[in-house]
Image (cartoon, helix red, strand yellow):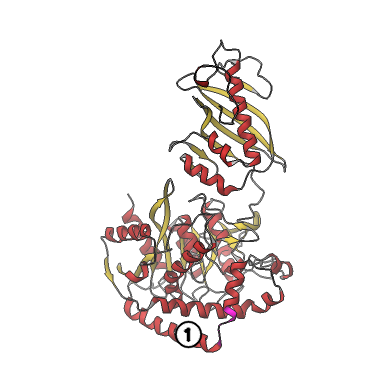
Amino acid sequence: MGPDGEPLDDGAAGVAARPEPVFAAGDDAPEGVTSIDGALDEATLDELLRAFRGYEAALMTNDLDALDRYFTPGPATLRGDASALLVGHDRISAFRGLRGGVPPRSLTDVHLRVIAGSNPLTVLVVSISVPAKGGSGQQTQLWTRLDSGWVISAAHVHAAAPAVDGRVWRVAGAPLVPAAGSGALDGMTVAVKDLFAVRGFAIGAGVPEYLATAPFENDDADAVAALRASGASVVGIAQTDEFAYSVAGRNVHSGTSPNPAVPGAIGGGSSSGPASAVALGQVTIGLGTDTGGSIRVPASYQGLWGIRTTHGAVSTRGLLPLAPSFDTVGWLTRSPEVLRAAAVATLGEPGALPTLEPRFVVAADLVAGCTPEVQAAFDHVTDELVFGLVDQVDLGDLDAVFAAFRAVQGAEAWRQHGAWITEHPGALGPDIAERFELGSRVTASQEDAARVLLADARRRFDEVLAGRVLLLPSASSSAPALDASAEVIASVRAATLRMTSVAGAGGYPAVSAPLLRVPASGGTAPVGLCLVGPRGTDLPLIGLATSIAAELAP
């Protein structure tokens, strides 16, 4: 039987007998084939074309079992596209299970090239596809004939690109808004999270119903203006989780942001669009916000550099708030040099900078909620540090700090958006709606008690850290799978926010550097190493993280 379930022609071991070649380079190609280079007999060519067409039919119906049969079993099978390379049949199969099918298309050109005439017979098939919605794509497949029939051992897909990927962008241009000056960011491009004012556009906050009645902004947010003044242009306004109240990168309206570092995994949020735009190479800088981890988590999941700045260091004028006591502005980049350039453009040229010695501390209780793989990677990196001392510290009752952080965050979030949410029932996804509903229940006395606890924790953190830099993973795990259940996502979120809320409670700057790797299906996945420094040490903290990266480089 062939991989498409059809019987093969009669012949030994189920393989057709091989008469003299009847199709070769220069001959007229059979129907449905544009050209052939290399000799194939008629029966063999028929088998290959039946398998090729059967695979295409399985794609159109999203027949996962058939698609699995069409790919060579084992760890060496390859499937790549513009976003990632998948290695191994199991990873390819898992990707298909999450993809949800291929849009309808037709094939216009099919070119065959015989790569190996035997042991086993291998043919390269390159085809052009035309999606029903327009555009064109290209598929390159390496077909191998086994005893069981024809299967694909390697494939590369160049799909028709959408004008704008709605998972990443709300609106984009070339550019959307040009630079307003010249400086260190000349030639760089920015993805602006859909919480910042961009002159001439409305703020949508990841909620279409909110966007529908939002006014057009008369001025750029200060954080946007600073980047433009230094030479950067704005490519577009990028997606965010609804009202920035999530770290998953999932939005029921725009979808889940892509993660090119870990195909088949979520991208992290709530600065989801800016992170994906940077990771995909579509922009140089992602302008985002971080309340409880919304820059650090997507940076960790996608292998990026990111910083949550000292609370209050960057103006929030023109920023739609979530929880003003914790909201900060920050950036996502692919390199520490660009991260520093964006920070300098916004914070100003460094003058007399605070000193930041390579003195590090680790809180075991803070790391205890991480997966074993993340703990092992973190321990390995901290053991490798040779230019700085690493001491153990006790930060106190972190569960109580996290509970207080959530109470104040929830109460402030409800004050910011509760009236609108009440007037627009059903406008939010269930997970975000539940968080706001919980925030609405926080009483004034509960909020006051939580603020007292956070103030005490801040003083304790200042005393314990004593000018040193706290090291921890940026997230409790690598990026969860796209099909992870709501329960799994909630569990990962809680474990991660228990860690990330320390910087929020202290108002500290925190840099996420892509320096940890953990095992993942068929390979490895990135996890950030987070450095939390004293307030006001944003630029020295980036420098210290850069030095660690250089030390750990192979």
Tell me which corner region of the image, top left, top right, bottom left or bottom right, holds residue 368.
Answer: bottom left
Task: Please tell me which residue is depicted at 64% across the width and 33% down the height of the picture.
Answer: 128
Q: Which residues are magenta?
A: 439-443
Amino acid found under the numbered disc labelled 1 = Arg
In the rendered image, residue 426, in percent from the top left (x then y), is placed at: 69, 69
Secondary structure of the residue carrying tag 1 is helix
Image quadrant in which the N terminus is located: top right
**Whether residue 319 is visible:** no
Mark 1: few, some, or many residues within 10 Å (few <14, many ≥20)? some
Of residues 54 and 195, which is closer to you in this image? 54
Position of residue 42 relative to residue 248, above or below, is: above
Instruction: Tell me the chief SS of the magenta region.
Output: loop
Residue 470 is left or right of residue 179, and the answer is: left
User: Which residue reaches farthest right?
Assistant: 213
In the rendered image, residue 552, in percent from the top left (x then y), is placed at: 32, 55
In the rendered image, residue 546, in percent from the top left (x then y), is placed at: 37, 59
Q: Which residue is mark 1?
A: 451
Of residues 261 and 227, which is closer to you in this image? 261
In the rendered image, residue 229, in percent from the top left (x then y), is placed at: 57, 64
Task: Please tell me which residue is depicted at 63% across the width and 30% down the height of the picture.
Answer: 53
Of residues 37 and 180, which is closer to you in this image? 37
Task: Please tell me which residue is depicted at 55% across the width and 41% down the height of the picture.
Answer: 81
